[in-house]
Amino acid sequence: MLGKDKTKELTAKVYELWERKVVVPRIRHGKKQTVETLINEEALLLAKYLRNETQLWIPRVVNSKKMLTINKGIVLIDK
């Protein structure tokens, strides 16, 4: 169990992580965004795919060695 000071420090560090900028274009505008915004936007894009509102979902954050594409229920991994 963390003490009060350590809990406060951990909370501040986690918040700092969510507020870091990443170079991934936003859905609407801009070239950078926070990690928190990126997670929310990716969740929105995945939800649209799962509700059949879009035919294709390509994650904007992927392993640099592999490309993942989900198209009509088929997961494609390019090496």
Image (tube, grey):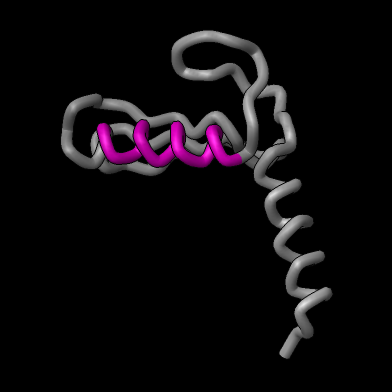
Quadrant placement of the C terminus: top right
* Residue 40 is a magenta residue: yes
The spot of residue 26 in percent (x, y) is 53, 19
Does residue 40 appear left or right of residue 6 in this picture? left
**Bounds of the magenta segment:** 36-48
Is residue 16 depicted above or below 24 in this figure?
below
Q: How many marks?
A: 0
Identify which residue is drawn at 57% across, 40% down.
36
Q: Which residue is at 66% across, 45% downward?
A: 18
Q: Which residue is farthest bottom?
A: 1
> Residue at horizontal 17%, vertical 38%?
51
Residue 5, position as x, y percentages in the image: 82, 74
Quarter of the figure with the N terminus: bottom right
- Residue 45 in percent (x, y) is at 36, 32
- Residue sitting nearer the eye, 1 or 66: 1
Of 9 and 14, the residue lying toward us: 9
34 or 74: which is nearer to us?
Answer: 34
Q: Is residue 29 left or right of residue 44?
A: right
Foreground: 61 or 1? 1
Residue found 74% across the figure and 73% down from its top? 7
